[in-house]
Amino acid sequence: MLPNIVQVSIFWTVQASAILTVAVPFRWAFIALWAVSHFARAIGLTLAFHRYFAHRAFKMNRVARFVWTWIATSAMQKGPIWWAGHHVNHHKYADREGDPHSPMVSGVYYAHIGWFLNDAKHDTVAPTNPVVRDFSKAPEIAFLDRYFFLPPLVLAVAMFAIGGLPWLVWGFCLPTMTLAHATFAINTVNHMFGTRRFETHDESRNNVLTALFAAGEGWHNNHHRYQGAARNGFYWWEFDPTWYVIRAMAALRLAWDVHPVPRRIYEEARVVRARRSRRTMTSIIDAIPLSFELLEETE
């Protein structure tokens, strides 16, 4: 485990290095390089760290698990057990004391990034946490959790080896920065701005912008209503590329026991929508106020 001051220094150095995009020659192909690096790792984070480790929304074989966990760890957001363990705590105490990153409890900066970098109480996850209990005995997962700096380091070295400084900047520095804030925005933006399909006990919201940049994670109110589903976008029009990848893995028999959204949840959404519609429906009396004095005069 790297000392915290080293971790913080490296993190902010990579964040600041994204500005080097203005110092290297630009090519339109670099936009594609950024997109591949950003979205491949975004899918890794939500597929492996989130939907697999934290919520057991599906199962996959050991080789596929290691590959996706490596990809996710290369996002430079610490290790799988640490990440998923804290996410379990987020759901346990959502927007209440004990939530590691609630803007309602600890303020926007702390919820967005302060808890991730600076607070000693979040350096480790309790041994009683279900993620620790169930996955820390897998040696390859424990290795990636302990040496979480290796996958991003390998990616950075590979980018530089392939294309020098431009590839390092566009294939590692910039997408690592954008992915960090896309992920952290789920903790802040999605608890302050967006729509609430379900009346949950927390402030979770659906937000199409964060869903786009976080590979489907932005359907956060959906997720808080039913955490066990392998999809966060509950309807076909809710963009969720991670769900498409899980479906493809299932078709190839690399994933199985994929948990769907239960019918009762869709029915609840329908009932809530109908109830809200009735609340906002304007009656004809309110829409066209009648003058009773005029009526009396014409009788």
Image (spheres, grey):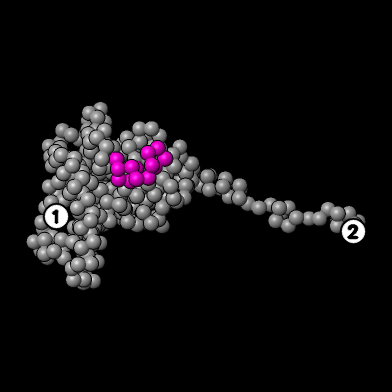
- Residue 198 position, x and y percent, is 47, 44
State the extent of the magenta-drawn residues as a range: 103-115
Q: Secondary structure at mark 1?
A: helix
Q: Main secondary structure of the magenta part?
A: helix
- 143 inside magenta stretch: no
**263 w.r.t. 241: above or below:** above
In the image, what residue occupies the spot 8% across and 61% down? 161
- Quarter of the image for residue 213 reads bottom left
Question: What residue is pinned by disc 2?
Answer: 298
Relative to 97, residue 244 above or below? below
- Between residue 80 and residue 266, name the one nearer to us: 80
Residue 160 placed where, x, y %?
Answer: 11, 61
Q: Residue furthest left?
A: 161
Residue 251 visible in this rendered orientation of the protein: no
Which quadrant: the N terminus? top left
Left or right of 1, for residue 262: right
